[in-house]
Amino acid sequence: MSTTNKIQAKSGRDIARYNAREGAILTNERLRSVTNKIGESYNKVKLSLTTMHERYETSKGERNILQRYATLKRMIKDVVQLDAQYWRLLEIPKQELHEQVNVYVLRACAALEKASETRTAEGGKGHAAKNHEEEAKDRDAKARFDGVSTQDIEAENEQLINDLYRLLKKYSNLKNIVHELNVAYVDTKSYPVIPRYTMLKEMIKDVFRDPNYMEVCHEEVG
């Protein structure tokens, strides 16, 4: 191989390594950003459910059925408004039956990024502010990955994908609990006070007995 060809081959390998590294860094930033966004919605849903749990336990000391009935209604309404006011929580796509974890997570990232761009545009954030944010992210990324190998970044990405996948599943499960509670609550509105009082109690206790709630109810809220 001639000297010129050797130089060209080395240059090609350097470009490929650079592109692989930049791609790994970009993926890392996307995963971290989406994890933060999902974490905010997840904590919001979880806090609403655990707060309802605490309020329900406190309400047991109320001996007046009508007073407690009113309390149960209020605590349920405080939770189900997250479902009724859908814009307060992030919507995530469902995983296809045979979709691999990494493919699903990156698809969810793309969907949430698109939704975030739409919300930003509707919120009226200017280009200057957005550019400032991007520049700050670039500086942070450069400092964070300085001296870190591409292989190590890719290994971290694998862990981030697995962590985000678990978070997406937990968030989706809690969001579904809130939705089912909202549907059940609306269905009870036609019943008289006494039977409805019993139904509200059972609805709340069903939430507490749900395995998806039991799995996370003792976690610290981030």
Image: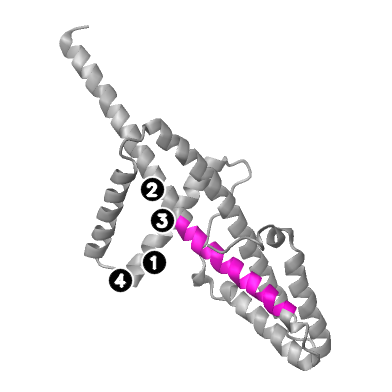
Could you say whether the residue bearing mark 1 is in a helix, strand or loop?
A: helix
Tell me the residue that label 3 is attached to: 113
Distance from label 2 to label 4 (Cα)? 24 Å
Tell me the residue that label 1 is attached to: 119
Is the residue 46 above or below the residue 145 in the image? Answer: below
Tell me the residue that label 4 is attached to: 124
* Residue 218 % position (x, y): 66, 62
* Mark seen at residue 29: 2
Disc with the residue nearer the chain's start (3 vs 1): 3
The amino acid on which the numbered mark 3 sits, given as a three-letter code, is: Glu
The amino acid on which the numbered mark 4 sits, given as a three-letter code, is: Gly
Q: Main SS type for the magenta part?
A: helix
Is residue 34 a member of the stretch shown in magenta? no
Distance from label 1 to label 2 (Cα)? 20 Å
Mark 1 neighbour class, 10 Å CA radius: few under 14, some 14 to 19, many 20 or more = few
The quadrant in which residue 7 appears is top left
